[in-house]
Structures are given as structure tokens and as C-alpha cells.
């Protein structure tokens, strides 16, 4: 089935196309629709259509702006522009953006079917051409890959003498690879696959490197791949390294690789010294793999492992509530002990730590009760909690805190049936931690809970009463309101903090949900 997404601010047009176009019998499926480009953009990122049909004149983000953004982030999507304006300048702009078709309204089902047929034909032709090119490329590279692997390995692992480096460079040049650059960084890429075969992951990374214009060269090793990144200066090579690492993470996820860790060495200026960069990357991997509470996948450079804060006020600690928001009662001891161990790792006077823990426990327990409409004073044994704590005794604080939190979780469990589905609990917990990521999509959360995209979307909506996009937006708006109330952050900074890249779009969504823009909301709250 070819997936189609429709954007038009005229409801009559959307209903006409939705209801009268022969979707199923023609081999197409309508995966979503929206009245505006700004609303459509995150939905398109979620639904991954093959074809986008969009009106050209819409509020907030018109069809041309939407097309430009789609071509930037999802260039494979084919675009059909609909317009009621017979204006050559619009058509000219649309063509310059790579739009496939430009049609004047009103359009009939037969006309749209003809247009979509032409696009599908071009999609098939592109696919066949790409497969032929890749086949030829694979045949040409197959004979050279073993030799290139050996040469790159000798460079990166520093097994070759410095005197041999010019010879290696010359041999690589005869194979069509130029290793001349001002700066170099080595990436150590490790991953596993369910069946133990790393070939799909390696093939995906080789394809990615082939598209780098020669600035990335790879070689294999038993745990994954090593990459040599080349750049014009230290900033350039650093940018290329992180960009390749992010793309590599995406490609490895697409082939179901697991336990992905990408570490980067320091930038160096001499090809003969790339072994030092490799050792630094391996050292970072070794340190990270032995850290408690480490999370995979991960991308780490040398700077990412430095400067860890030890003062409580400078720690990036998540509130205790975020740790307990979606857990089951039986997970309480384990999760709380992990949280306490984070506090124990700080070099802070014990009294400050204990006071902080008591405050967090009390606030969290009260919030858990209020989440399901309860009154904390009628549920929690707050006086017993305070009486059970002995000054400067961590064990008594932990014991009393566990008892209070257990009361809150038992009450929540008996008053909120949503907490029964483990996968949705995990998904909501993941969203609570990652909602500020502007690139977060449904597929990321579905993968986290080991569900297909369609199954997760269905179960999530049934359990929560919201679609994924609605829930994520509500989560971001809730945090935005909190920041507007209790901080002096500018609205544009709040926008970026809660996961939006466009302050205008953020303001539009906020006003749509709250009936007023962020600035008025802050003024109203301050007056109250």
C-alpha cells in the first residue's frame, strides 16, 4: 500500500478527498490529515507517508513552507501541491523545491488518481535505478573491501610503523580512497545483533560511509566497526564525527542492532597518530561500560566524560516523582534504592542530603495521591513519617520514605486502572524522560517497549485515551506551563526546553490549548 498524507485548511476539500477517493481499491491508504502545515509536520514524521498532498495557502505554515521542511528532513516523500490560485510564481517556487505535481482546485478523484499513478511509477523507477547502481557498486567494491579493511585496520590500530604510513596512503589512493586531511578523529562503534551476525549492521554503516563524499572510512573488527573521520579543522572534524555517529545510530537501529555504543577519540593532526585517537575512544568505552546505571545506545566523546558535578545544587537530578510516576509497587524498592545511591555518590554534607531526600519523598508521595484525585492528608501517614526519622541517620530516612511511598503507590493503584499495562507504563515513563527531545517520534517509543508502530499506536490510545501526538503535546504543554509559572525563562527558551524548535509554532500550540499566548499566561498566573 502507498501511504498518503493530506493537508488542507478547507474541511470540505479534506472530506471530499477522504470520502470519495477510492483508496483501498486503488492501492493507497490515507495515513493522516491536518488543517495546517505546523500541525501536520509532527504527524508526518510519525506516520512516514510516501506521498504528501498539501494545499498551498494555509495559516501559520503554508504548503510551500511545509514542502521545503519536508524536503529537508524527509527528502524521499513525493509532494503534490493543490491550489486555488492560478499563479505562475507559486508553480515556479513549487518546482524549485522539487514538488512532483502542481494542481489547481477543484480536483476530481480521477484526476488525483492519475497524478498519484504517475508518482508511483516514478517511485518504482527510482527504486529500480537505485538497486542497479547499488548492485554495480557492490560488485566493484567487493574485491577491494578486504584489502581496504586490512589497510585501514593497520592505520587505526597503530600496528603499522610510521614509515609505512605513506605507503598505506598510496595503496589506498590506488583503491580510490584519499586519506589526506587537516584533522582526524577515530570512532569506536560497538553493537550486537539478536542472531550474532553483525553483517547487516556493517553493511548499513558501509553504505552510510559511501555517502559521505570520502570523509569517512571504515574497517571491521569483532565487536563492530571503526571509523576514521576526516575534516578541514578541529571544529569541522568534530561536527562530522557527531553527525556520522547520529546517522550510524539511526542506521543500526533500523537493522535491529542492540547495545549500541559509539565513542570518539581526540582530534589529531597527523595520520600517523590516529592510533592515539583510537586508544582514547577505547578508553572512553571501557570507562562507560563499567559505570553503574549506564544506558545504551549512547554516543560519547572525550568531553562528554569530563566535568561531572558533585554538588547537589549542580547535579542534573530528575525529581523523585519522575522515577516513580509509572512504576509498579513491586519495583519501588529497586527504583528508590537506585535514586538514593545517586545522592550517596555526591560529596555533600549528610544533613543536606537527608533534608533533600525527605523533601522529595514527601512532595512525591503527595503528588502521586493528587494525580488520581486523592487528598494526601487523608491518605498518607505524614506524622508517622516525620516521627520515624532520626536525625543524620540515612537508614531511618530510607525506611520511613519507603513506607510513605508505598502508601501512595497502593492508593494510586487502587484508584487508577491505567497503571495496569506494563508496556504503556514503560512508554509513559520513557516519554516523561525524553519528551524534550525535538526528534522524538512514535517509532522510538514503540521500539523501547518492543511493539510494532501500529500496535503501539492502537494500545497506547486505548489505554490513555490520547493519540501519541496528543499525549506528547499535552506533556510538553504541562511542562511549559510549569516553567512559565516558576521560572523567568523567556518563552522562546521554554519552547526549546520542552522539545519544540520553532517558537512561533510553540506559541500557536500553547494558545490553542490554553486560550492565550505564553506571555499572557505568565502574567495571569503572576497576578493570581
Image (cartoon, grey):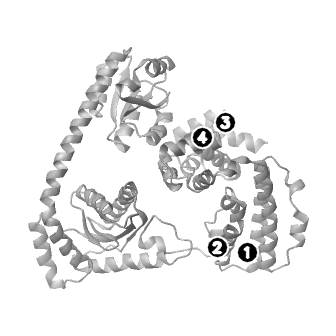
Residue most toward the front?
Answer: 195
Above or below for 389 versus 484: below
| Label disc, if present, on residue 353 of the rendered structure | 1
- Crowd band around label 2 with a 10 angstrom C-alpha radius: few (<14), some (14–19), many (20+): few
Dot placed on the residue nearer the N-terminal end, 1 or 3: 1
CA distance separating discs 1 and 2: 11 Å
Residue 270 visible in the displayed image: no
Residue at label 3?
Answer: 514
Q: Position of residue 77 (x, y in %)?
A: 34, 37
- Count of numbered labels shown in the rendering: 4
Q: Identify the residue at image location x=37%, y=34%.
A: 1
| Residue in the foreground of this view, choosing between 266 and 449 | 449
Dot placed on the residue nearer the N-terminal end, 3 or 2: 2
| Label disc, if present, on residue 342 of the rendered structure | 2
- Crowd band around label 3 with a 10 angstrom C-alpha radius: few (<14), some (14–19), many (20+): few
Residue contact at pointers 4 and 1, CB within 8 angstroms: no
The local secondary structure at tag 2 comes to helix
Amino acid at each position: 500500500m502507498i501511504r498518503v498524507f493530506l493537508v488542507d485548511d478547507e474541511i470540505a476539500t479534506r472530506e471530499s478527498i477522504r470520502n470519495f477517493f477510492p483508496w483501498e481499491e486503488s492501492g493507497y491508504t490515507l495515513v493522516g490529515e491536518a488543517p495546517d502545515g505546523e500541525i501536520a509536520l509532527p504527524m508526518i514524521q510519525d506516520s512516514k507517508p510516501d506521498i504528501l498532498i498539501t494545499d498551498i495557502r494555509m495559516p501559520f505554515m503554508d504548503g510551500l513552507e511545509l514542502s521545503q521542511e519536508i524536503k529537508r528532513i524527509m527528502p524521499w516523500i513525493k509532494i503534490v501541491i493543490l491550489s486555488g490560485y492560478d499563479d505562475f510564481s507559486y508553480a515556479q517556487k513549487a518546482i524549485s523545491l522539487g514538488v512532483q505535481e502542481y494542481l489547481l482546485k477543484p480536483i476530481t478523484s480521477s484526476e488525483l488518481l492519475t497524478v498519484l499513478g504517475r508518482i508511483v511509477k516514478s517511485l518504482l523507477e527510482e527504486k529500480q535505478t537505485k538497486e542497479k547502481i547499488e548492485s554495480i557498486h557492490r560488485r566493484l567494491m567487493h574485491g577491494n573491501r578486504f584489502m581496504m579493511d586490512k589497510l585501514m585496520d593497520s592505520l587505526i590500530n597503530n600496528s603499522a610503523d610510521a614509515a609505512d604510513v605513506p605507503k598505506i596512503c598510496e595503496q589506498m589512493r590506488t583503491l580510490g580512497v584519499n586519506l589526506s586531511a587537516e584533522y582526524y578523529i577515530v570512532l569506536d562503534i560497538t553493537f550486537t545483533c539478536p542472531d550474532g551476525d553483525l553483517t547487516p549492521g556493517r553493511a548499513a554503516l558501509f553504505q552510510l560511509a559511501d555517502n559521505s563524499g570520502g570523509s569517512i572510512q571504515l574497517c571491521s573488527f569483532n565487536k563492530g566497526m571503526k571509523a576514521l573521520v576526516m575534516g578541514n579543522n578541529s571544529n569541522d572534524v568534530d561536527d562530522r564525527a557527531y553527525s556520522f555517529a547520529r546517522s550510524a545510530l539511526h542506521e543500526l537501529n533500523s537493522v535491529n542492532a542492540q547495545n549500541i555504543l559509539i565513542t570518539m577519540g581526540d582530534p589529531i593532526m597527523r595520520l600517523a597518530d590516529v592510533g592515539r585517537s583510537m586508544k582514547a575512544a577505547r578508553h572512553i568505552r571501557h570507562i562507560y561500560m563499567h559505570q553503574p546505571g549506564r544506558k545504551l545506545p549512547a554516543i560519547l566523546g572525550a568531553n562528554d566524560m569530563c566535568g561531572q558535578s558533585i554538588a547537589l545544587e549542580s547535579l542534573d537530578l530528575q525529581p523523585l516523582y519522575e522515577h516513580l510516576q509509572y512504576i509498579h509497587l513491586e519495583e519501588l524498592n529497586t527504583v528508590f534504592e537506585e535514586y538514593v545511591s545517586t545522592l550517596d555518590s555526591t560529596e555533600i554534607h549528610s544533613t543536606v542530603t537527608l533534608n533533600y531526600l525527605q523533601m522529595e519523598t514527601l512532595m512525591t508521595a503527595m503528588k502521586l495521591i493528587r494525580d488520581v484525585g486523592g487528598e494526601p492528608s487523608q491518605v498518607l501517614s505524614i506524622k508517622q513519617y516525620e516521627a520515624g526519622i532520626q536525625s543524620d541517620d540515612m537508614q531511618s530516612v530510607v525506611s520511613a520514605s519507603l513506607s510513605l511511598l508505598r502508601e501512595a503507590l497502593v492508593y494510586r493503584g487502587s484508584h487508577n486502572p491505567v497503571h495496569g499495562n506494563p508496556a504503556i507504563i514503560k512508554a509513559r515513563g520513557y516519554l516523561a524522560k525524553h519528551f524534550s527531545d525535538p526528534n522524538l517520534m512514535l517509532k522510538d517509543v514503540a521500539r523501547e517497549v518492543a511493539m510494532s508502530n501500529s500496535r503501539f499506536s492502537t494500545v497506547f490510545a486505548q489505554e490513555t485515551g490520547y493519540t501519541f501526538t496528543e499525549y506528547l503535546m499535552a506533556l510538553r504543554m504541562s511542562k511549559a506551563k510549569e516553567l512559565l509559572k516558576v521560572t523567568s525563562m523567556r518563552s522562546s527558551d521554554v519552547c526549546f526546553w520542552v522539545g519544540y524548535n520553532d517558537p512561533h509554532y510553540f506559541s500557536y500550540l500553547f494558545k490553542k490549548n490554553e486560550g492565550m499566548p505564553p506571555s499572557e499566561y505568565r502574567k495571569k498566573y503572576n497576578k493570581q
